[in-house]
Amino acid sequence: MDNGLHLKAVEICRGGQPLLQIDAQVAPGEILTVMGPSGSGKSTLLSFLTGHLAPAFAATGQVVLDGSDVTAQPPEHRKIGILFQDDLLFPHLSVGANLAFGLRGGTKSERQKTIETALSDVGLKGFETRDPATLSGGQKARVALMRVLLSDPKALLLDEAFSGLDTDRRAQIRDLTFDHARKKNLPVVMVTHDIDDAKAAGGRVIQLGP
Amino acid sequence: MTDRAVRRPASAARSFWGALPLLTLIIMIGPVLAGLLGTVLPAFGYLPAAGLGAFSITPFTDLFAWNGIWAATRLSVITGFAATFLSLAIVTLLMAGWSGTRAFRWLETLLSPLLSVPHAATAFGIAFLIAPSGWIARMISPWLTGWERPPDVLITQDPLGIALTLGLVTKEVPFLLLMALAAKGQSASTQRMRVAQSLGYGRVSGWLKSVFPVIYAQIRLPVLVVLAYSMSVVDVAMILGPTTPPPLSVQVVKWMSDPDLSKRLIASAAALWQLALVIAALGVWWIGERITARLGLAWVERGTRNLHLDKTTRPLGIILGTLSALSVLLGLLCLGVWSVAGFWGYPDALPQSLTPKNWARHWPDISDSLITTLLIAALSVAVAVTLVIACLEAEHRTGRSLSQKALWLIYAPLLIPQIAFLPGVQTGLLMTGATSGLWPVTLMHVVFVLPYVFLSLTDPWRNWDPRIDTIARSLGTSPTRVLFTLRLPMLLRPILTAAAVGFAVSVGQYLPTLLAGGGRVATLTTEAVALSSGGDRRAIGAFGVMQTLAVIAPFAIATLLPYWMWRNRKGLHG
């Protein structure tokens, strides 16, 4: 029962004032939804999980991933991937290079093959050399999703990841993301203010704040 | 042991990054403090290098016994206040009356590149324009004036320092304008103006009452820099200022370059006197700010709409702003024409022929000093950019940002007059037996290049989206790889711009090159200024043109290189 993401008695304070408390276990393939009004510390929780908590905050508790405590690990060793509202593709790199940036290991031809497959998986076959700025919002979101998945994370965080998309794209990208996360058996923590996201996830919902 | 505060980076790495800002500060402030010490000691009679080891106040009694002291002091103070006040007034009128208009944008484009042109080149250009034998006199002679030969009046180098003041104003207007424009971005000025105008205020009164206070608060340090600089400038004063007596700072340089080493005592005393004057002037300006703030507040509280202000001040602002820009541009053009002029008799408006001969004759000197100029600039900019990036990266990694106090320290080398501590640097080099030359000059350039590189790069650096870092790190990338493969390439354009700014600062330095170089390091600027007494306009023109090219070229590279490198990356062309 050690697999998955375990938030053990996590408490985050700001300037000595408690901001949020959470204790939760997210099993592989499960999607935990965290909701709450702005200011309730949803995104702060995710920065704590990735290891980017701003100096103004202090946190206690542990983050345990697949049985090992990663609380003290620097962000790059945690293997916790994150997607934001904006795609945040690196603007100076091609689509292919963006994917290669996160991809671990492999020979040159293996890496090329993996990137090619990943792109055709999300209907972007042959997009390797494209400038990310020339892609549509939905296309960018799909590249961003593939970039994080290729880095072979052990958990996935979604920080309002679908709020930037228009209604049509939104459900489509959401389903795509959930499908891939489940296929890879990833524990997912999703922060959102949209009840539709929570319904689509179909898992537990934790309400933060008053 | 389960509950632990979240960890910051390992302590060894943290102390390395934590120490970087301190190291940078030492490199920047160290020479200033050492130089001040090297000025204070001789000012009180202590100069072992000249066999003088007894402390006394004789240097000061000698200084105040010099019959030019009060005229020199008056020149320094009046020039400083007049140039600062006029520059600030022109910038304020321009922004109040015209910001957001097409004319303003046009003038902004015209003024921005002028910021980088070295002071000496600008001053020569102005001199070539307004002298009795200058371009303006030639344009209107003899048909208007009847002059067949240059009239015998002192227009440049006038005893009141009017030409000097005007020369400074034309150079400080672009500086303050760009500083104010940078501040405007954070002042919500458009919204403030919309509110003010909807309440029935005019453009100028609305701007002065609702936007000016925010902007002034942000350009305050640059304004103080302009004041300190204008009071103690040497190169512009040697070109446009009076000679009998010269402004105080020029007299210090004269005493410093006297072969009689004991003259350094009076030079050091005068340098300290100059420092005292600047400190006093900064204090007076500070009081003036308080009074203006109080009067301004009363004016705001009266609620007068002052619509009539627009009619008078708007034309005034645009005329003065345009005149300021035109005088620099025409001056540079005039330098260019003189550099290729064949025979050019008075009062002809243009030379009879154009010739490359002047360039050919002076090319050996020009190319030698060009190489030295580029070498010093490249080295000092490389050091400064590296240190600034290291400091900003340290700020990012340690999560501690720069305090307001530290900002004053960054401005310190710009607020303390060069003439107050550079003589001490030279004396110090002499005392320790270190050879003055290229290395001390480069180090001194770093002192002045660093603040400008820092000011230029800080905002773009801090505005970089931190979520890029979060994403990259969560993909398994080390902080160092994030820096080199993401942040630096994405910030290529602002980094190159900051480097170009630093380059221009280095190319324009006169006093640090002269004093830390012991007079043996010849750059374009020192050579050009040295030519000023001889009056060979063709040589001055060629050196001035070369100076201008040496600062324009890096800006061109900073614009074109990112454009070319990221030609297939639309996301990087904001």
Image (cartoon, coloured by chain):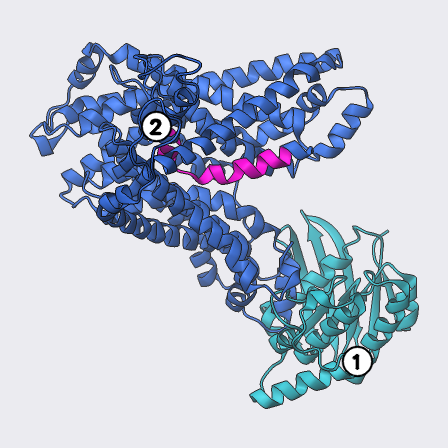
Does residue B521 lie above or below A85 as drawn?
above
Q: Looking at the image, which residue is at 53% across and 28% down?
A: B220
Depth check: B67 or A27 in front? B67
Q: Is residue B485 visible?
A: yes
- Where does residue B182 sit, x and y in percent of width and height? 59, 38
User: Magenta segment range?
Assistant: B104-123
Residue receiving disc 1: A123
In the image, residue B399 lies in the stretch drawn in magenta: no
Q: Secondary structure at mark 1?
A: loop
- Circle 2 packing at 10 Å, graded few (<14), some (14-19), many (20+), is many
- The answer to whether B573 appears left or right of B523 in the picture is right
Depth check: B394 or B341 in front? B341
Chain ID at mark 1: A
Chain ID at mark 2: B
Q: Residue furthest left?
A: B51
Q: Looking at the image, which residue is at 45% across and 28% down?
A: B226
Give the image quarter of residue B520: top left
Q: Looking at the image, which residue is at 51% across and 65% down?
A: B484
- The answer to whether B560 appears left or right of B387 in the picture is right
Does residue B81 lie above or below A173 as drawn?
above
Residue receiving disc 2: B236
- Where does residue B424 sit, x and y in percent of width and height? 23, 33
Give the Cα distance between marks 2 and 1.
66 Å
Query: Which chain is painted in cyan?
Result: A
- The answer to whether B86 appears left or right of B414 in the picture is right
Depth check: B540 or B467 in front? B540
Chain B: its colour in the image is blue
- Circle 1 packing at 10 Å, graded few (<14), some (14-19), many (20+), is few
Q: Which quadrant of the rendered structure holds the C terminus of chain B?
A: bottom right
Q: Secondary structure at mark 2?
A: helix
Q: Which quadrant of the rendered structure holds the N terminus of chain B?
A: bottom right
